[in-house]
Amino acid sequence: MIRTTKILVSACAALWLANGAFAQEAPSASVVEQAIASNADRLPGDADRDSARHPAELIAFLGLTPNMTVAEVNPGGGWYSRILAPYVRGRGRYVGLEHHPDIYKDRYPNYAEGLRAFPGKVKDNPSLFGDKAIGAWIPSDAGLPAASNSLDVVIAVRALHNWIEADFFDAAADQVWQMLKPNGVFGVVQHRIDEDFDGSFEDAIAKGRWKQSDLIKAIEAQGFEFVAASEMNANPRDTKDYPEGVWTLPPSYELGDKDREKYAAIGESDRMTLKFRKVAR
């Protein structure tokens, strides 16, 4: 595992430098390993998902280094937060961007209240997030969640179907663009539907999924350049035809104990992993 991570980090670092996105430092294999394997902030069971989510490989693919300012979209249960925040809290800065609670206050009032508490959660937990961290909402109607041109990397994991479902894709993507530094990186991990899926776009979104080609075009239209795609989070066992969409699969298990062993054997969803760069628009 360690040897594989070092090779991955070295290869991705070379690609990252060749792209010229930043002139700071290449990702360090030892620091990445420490953020994953020797991280006391992770909860029991967190590491069980590493083989499905490949956090070390994702950090390397996006060129994220400990001195950067990284924003995480829709942190949710905090699985990625417990890796990203410790990774940058000594020299960089963590920014959490939860979805704005007003979007959900009528349909999902309990969920909205949890979102409303998020900025205080970050502020009140400097031991995890760092004393420079902030928690904010996206999209914000009271100015940008973080200063313009202040973020090195924004990461959105399994969140962009929500941007469409709740009708704020354009507003959120625009704010991501504004907050990123010139040439800053927008990293996306998203549940995927097959390119030959013959249902409607709305049908795919209802399952929690996008066609990869459609998502790339949608993000490019917001002022981003597509840099690369990775299959690190691909899952060929995912047949994408479940009664409760992606939430049928782990970790959600929306059907409870019904066919649980079957869905556990399939594992987490087939996901695209994409890297974009902010360009002038």
Image (tube, grey):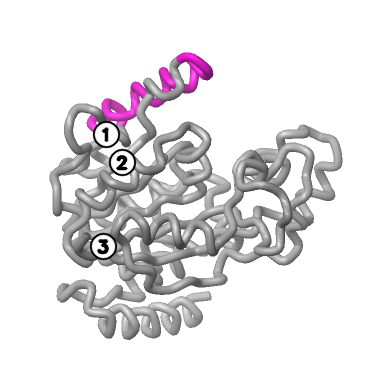
Q: Quadrant of the C terminus?
A: bottom left
Q: Residue at x 58, y 53 (%)?
A: 210
Residue at 30% across, 32% down? 137
- What are the residue bounds of the magenta stretch? 106-124
- If you read the primary sequence from the N terminus, does the residue marked by circle 2 or circle 1 appear first? 2
Question: How many other residues sit within 10 Å of disc 2, few (<14), some (14-19) or many (≥20)?
Answer: many
* Residue type at tag 1: Ala
Amino acid at the residue labelled 3: Lys
Residue 143 point in image, percent of width and height: 17, 33
> Mark 2 = which residue?
96
Residue pictured at 81% horizontal, 42% vertical:
260
Q: Are marks 2 and 1 in contact (CB under 8 Å)?
A: yes
132 horizontally vs 13: left or right? left
- Residue identifier under label 1: 136
Distance, label 2 to label 1, CA atoms, is: 6 Å
Vertical arrangement, residue 164 with respect to residue 209, above or below:
above
Q: Which residue is mark 3?
A: 278
Disc 2 is placed on an element classified as strand
**Relative to residue 132, is residue 280 depicted above or below?**
below
Mark 3 or mark 2, which has the lower sequence index?
A: 2
